[in-house]
Image (cartoon, rainbow, N blue to C red):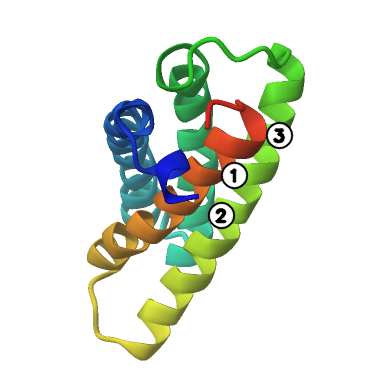
Amino acid sequence: MTSRFFNRHVGGMLVRNTASSSLSFLVSVSVLWALVTFASLDEVLAAAIGFVAAQVVHYALARGWIFPGSERALTTGFVIFLVNAGLGMAITVGLYAALLEWTSMNYLIARLVVSVFAGLAMFLSNATLNFGRV
């Protein structure tokens, strides 16, 4: 079982996913910051909106660069990606709200911490269930 996830092939995908996730995270945090700063939107709602915006960027990169060679149809893959993103959003918003409620952590730092957990869960879900590359 461990050799399935701990090998050079998966490591390469994880590196590409990390780069893509970093770009997507910047999109997410930029939207979060803009909505909180300029629209006075609630931080949790703004995080959810930023998360959705980032998913569009991430899917485009996932399809062609992170998990190349997927045999899944584009539309079906995107729908499954969005279901996986729903899992990621639940993890993100739930942990984010908890950190804001129970710690004195800055909202942007809290979002960074949460992204690590949500990102790994989404990577594994997409690598195995959606793109079938692991």
Tag 3 near tag 1, CB within 8 Å: no
Q: Which residue is mark 3?
A: 80
Q: Is residue 129 above or below residue 48?
A: above
Q: Which residue is mark 1?
A: 85
Mark 2 Cα within 10 Å, few/some/many (few <14, many 20+)? many
Residue 111: quadrant of the picture: bottom left
The answer to whether one can see residue 67 in this image is yes
How far apart are the alpha carbons under marks 3 and 2?
Answer: 14 Å
Residue 7: quadrant of the picture: top left
The secondary element bearing badge 1 is classed as helix
Where is residue 8? Give x, y as percent. Answer: 29, 29
The answer to whether one can see residue 42 in this image is no
Earlier residue among tags 3 and 2: 3
Where is residue 112? Give x, y as percent. Answer: 28, 58
Q: Nearer the viewer, mark 3 or mark 2?
A: 3
How far apart are the alpha carbons under marks 2 and 1?
Answer: 6 Å
Tag 2 near tag 1, CB within 8 Å: yes
Q: Which residue is mark 2?
A: 89
Where is residue 21? Give x, y as percent. Answer: 35, 36
**The residue under label 2 is which amino acid type?**
Met
**The residue under label 3 is which amino acid type?**
Ile
Q: Residue at the spot x=64%, y=50% of the render?
A: 86
Looking at the picture, tell me which residue is in the foreground, 105 or 83: 83
Would you say 53 lies left or right of 103 here?
right
Q: Residue at the spot x=46%, y=29% of the render?
A: 58
